[in-house]
Image (spheres, rainbow, N blue to C red):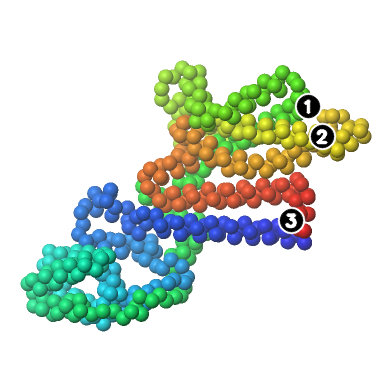
Amino acid sequence: MAPIRPLRQLLQLVATLWLMASMVFILSRLLPSTYKPRGMQDADVATYGLPDAATQSSITADYQKRTGLHLPLFYVGMVLQGRQQATHIKALPADRPWVEQAVLWKGVNAAIAFYTAWQAWLPSVPEKNRQEVFKELQTWVNSERLENRENQEQKVLNLLSSSPCPQGYTITNAWKNLQAAEAPLHYYLPQLNWNGAENAYYLWLKKLLKGDLGASNQDYEPVINKIGDAALISFAIAILGLVVGLITTYFAGLYFTLHPHSTFTKTSHLILYFLDSIPGFLIALGLYGLALYLAGYSSGNIFGENQGDESLLQLWTQPSILLGGLCIVLLILPHITLQFHRSLKDQMNKLYLKTALAKGLTYKKAIQVHALPNAMVASFTILSEVIIGLMAGVLIIETTFSLPGLGSLLTKSILSADFPVLIGLTLFFLLFRVVVIWVMDNLLALIDPRMNISQNA
């Protein structure tokens, strides 16, 4: 049974990551402006100028086709029968929205007749007339109330009847027939469709497994490259602070337990409680101000610019990374040290420790051999949350010291509405959290064999 447990845990990890990634995919489709290129938004209309309705529809359709957003979401989809009937009409991408709605409201035969007349009418009229009618058709399909829809139908009829071309009579009659038609009631009933591999979820998951998270909306750089460069900075700070903090916690907790009444222990406790009560941003600002004072600068970035191509060892030689690591130490040290010391104190009254002392072990040896492993079980339980919480501390430090890490990248992506980067960071943070918890659970099982017994029971 022993070899089965790691395999089962690995499968559970993969299943959890898959479910979380699927949730991120669904939420990403609910973000604003997902189905339009960035330049088509109101705030960025200067990118395309003020295009007419046909140009906007054409640009949007082309963007969706290039990015796979025109595909159905999943392998199986539910669609109204009227919209399914509309797929039999070979309409241009710009005309597809209003043609589908016309089929749903008026039936497929009347819609086909009008669209045929529409295609014959387009080449024979000036561009201005075409754009006016197209704009009214777009407004018509977006009309939710029946009275608004009827008003739009009359506007379209007036424009078509006044068009200066031989096909004006034909398309006017086709539009009147479309107005008078009614779609069958079963057009509004849903039906299940099997989309196969040609769906947005399959393509997104396929790219994700290859490490393709898309490109940034700001500089069109691959999202995976931006996250990788930022993660190196964040990990350099977090690993340095965590390692130093854990080493300090081990020796401090051991000393506090062996010398509970010493002046150093009492003073250290007061300092740790004081640090635990200070907000993280005040600690970062305090260290930054201290560094400015010691360096003799009144303003500016005293740490220099990060080049973005250094290795982890090179980063650990930079003053900004070292000071950021010190901030991490001060942020996590009070919590984990006091918890570790409290766990060791709880072991002092256990019968197994008294038995070890009665057999002749020294007080220090009994703590190191017997009490320490049991105290680490409780400490490892909170260590996973401490590691996950490092992301919040790293965000504060990167903002204070102007470091281009994950926290800074997240802030910039939110402020600039860079949704591909935001989605990529969300996936990264979810992956980081799940993997950390999974690793800590397995470490706890190695440290405390009783967990294996309880889980296999």
Kind of residue sitting beneath label 1: Leu
Where residue 120 appears, x then y in whole percent? 17, 77
| Relative horizontal placement of residue 102, taking residue 76 as reference (left or right) | left
Q: Which residue is mark 2?
A: 349
Image quarter in which the C terminus is found: bottom right
Q: Which residue is mark 1?
A: 258
Nearer the N terminus, badge 2 or badge 1? 1
| Relative horizontal placement of residue 325, taking residue 364 as reference (left or right) | left
Residue 90 visible, this orientation = no
Q: Residue at 42% x, 76% y: name it.
A: 191
Residue 451 visible, this orientation = yes
| Relative horizontal placement of residue 365, taking residue 93 as reference (left or right) | right
Image quarter in which the N terminus is found: bottom right
Q: Nearer the viewer, mark 3 or mark 2?
A: 2
Kind of residue sitting beneath label 3: Gln
Work out whether 171 lies above or below 155: below
Q: Residues within 10 Å of mark 3 (few under 14, many from 20)?
A: few
Q: Which residue is mark 3?
A: 455
Work out whether 23 lies above or below 226: below
Nearer the N terminus, badge 3 or badge 2? 2
Q: Secondary structure at mark 1?
A: helix
Q: Secondary structure at mark 3?
A: helix
